[in-house]
Image (cartoon, grey):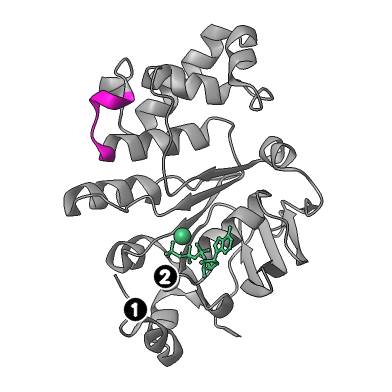
């Protein structure tokens, strides 16, 4: 892999996330094979690659849903490779999944307030009893406003179109104030206009102490909002660096030929 640009990080701050030589094996096949990336503070990294490239698998390994065969995951200078998913969430990781699963019997406000009820993620029922309700509702309402859903906080998921639910998923992921937010295809299934609006929202998410990795097939939007790209193909790292330079590489273009959706 050639690295054309180093992500810019503050000299006083470790990278928010380092993925070092991560390999994930399913039944003898490497779905991810030697993944390497560095995410600086306050950055938005686009993570692309053809279908089956192992993007979702790497995300799951980063947050701890899967155990890699080898490699290290470093979150804000701390090695979390042996930490369980709940611990990684507590330390500042969040994943907005490709298939969204809001709790159907709760309003948007309660969905996000539940997520904000830190440390009780294993049991939503317990979380409902123990949370300090007002504080969590305040956090939830601020987050729903941040993702553009202020007008519908008392609606139920079934009353709203997919574009709104994808925003809800982002608000839920933000509820524990993650240092590293992982977004898996947040634009999938959205109309062109909704995609553009969602991309605008994602572009505004990074800040001091909060960085974002965006997995997306919508290259037009990725190109528009991400300054840095990581490309994976057949599980292997193919390119990492400035967006225009990465997309101009022949090996990246070849990987996409005949494979894009
Ligand atoms: N739990 C699993 N068990 C066995 N094989 C798996 C599992 N999850 C993924 N795979 C395989 O690993 C490879 C990578 O899949 P993955 O879903 O990570 O790709 P992706 O880059 O996210 O693709 P897409 O863009 O279509 O979402 C594929 O060949 C897939 O079939
Ligand atoms: Mg995927």
- Mark 1 residue crowding within 10 angstroms, few (<14) / some (14–19) / many (20+): few
Residue 117, given in percent of the width and then of the height, sits at 60, 20
Residue under pointer 1: 259
The residue at the point 63 percent across, 27 percent down is 121
Residue 159 lies in the magenta-colored region: yes
Residue 185, given in percent of the width and then of the height, sits at 40, 54
Q: Is residue 16 visible?
A: no
Decide: marks 1, 2 in contact (CB < 8 A)?
Answer: yes
Q: In this view, does 197 lie to the left or right of 253?
A: left
Question: Marks 1/2: CA distance?
Answer: 7 Å
Highlighted magenta segment, given as a residue range: 157-163
Please tell me whether residue 164 is drawn above or below residue 211 in the rendered image: above
Residue 59, given in percent of the width and then of the height, sits at 58, 56
Q: Residue 51 carries which label?
A: 2
Please tell me whether residue 108 is drawn above or below residue 45 in the rendered image: above
The residue at the point 32 percent across, 14 percent down is 154
């Amino acid at each position: 892999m050639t690295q054309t640009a180093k992500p810019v990080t503050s000299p006083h701050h470790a990278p928010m996330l380092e993925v070092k030589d991560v390999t994930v094996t399913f039944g003898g096949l490497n779905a991810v094979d030697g993944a390497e990336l560095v995410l600086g503070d306050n950055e938005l990294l686009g993570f692309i690659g053809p279908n089956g490239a192992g993007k979702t698998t790497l995300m799951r390994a980063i947050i701890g849903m899967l155990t890699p065969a080898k490699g290290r995951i470093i979150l804000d200078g701390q090695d979390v490779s042996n930490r369980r998913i709940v611990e990684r969430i507590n330390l500042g990781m969040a994943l907005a999944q490709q298939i969204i699963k809001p709790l159907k019997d709760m309003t948007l406000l309660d969905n996000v307030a539940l997520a904000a009820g830190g440390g009780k993620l294993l049991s939503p029922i317990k979380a409902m009893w123990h949370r300090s309700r007002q504080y969590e509702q305040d956090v939830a309402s601020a987050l729903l406003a941040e993702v553009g859903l202020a007008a519908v906080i008392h609606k139920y998921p079934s009353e709203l179109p997919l574009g709104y639910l994808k925003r809800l998923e982002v608000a839920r992921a933000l509820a524990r104030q993650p240092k590293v937010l992982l977004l898996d295809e947040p634009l999938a299934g959205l109309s062109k206009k909704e995609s553009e609006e969602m991309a605008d929202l994602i572009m505004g998410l990074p800040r001091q102490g909060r960085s974002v990795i965006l997995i997306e097939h919508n290259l037009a939007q990725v190109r528009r909002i991400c300054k840095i790209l990581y490309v994976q193909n057949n599980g292997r790292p193919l390119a990492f660096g400035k967006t225009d330079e990465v997309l101009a590489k022949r090996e990246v273009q070849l990987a996409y030929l005949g494979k894009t959706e």
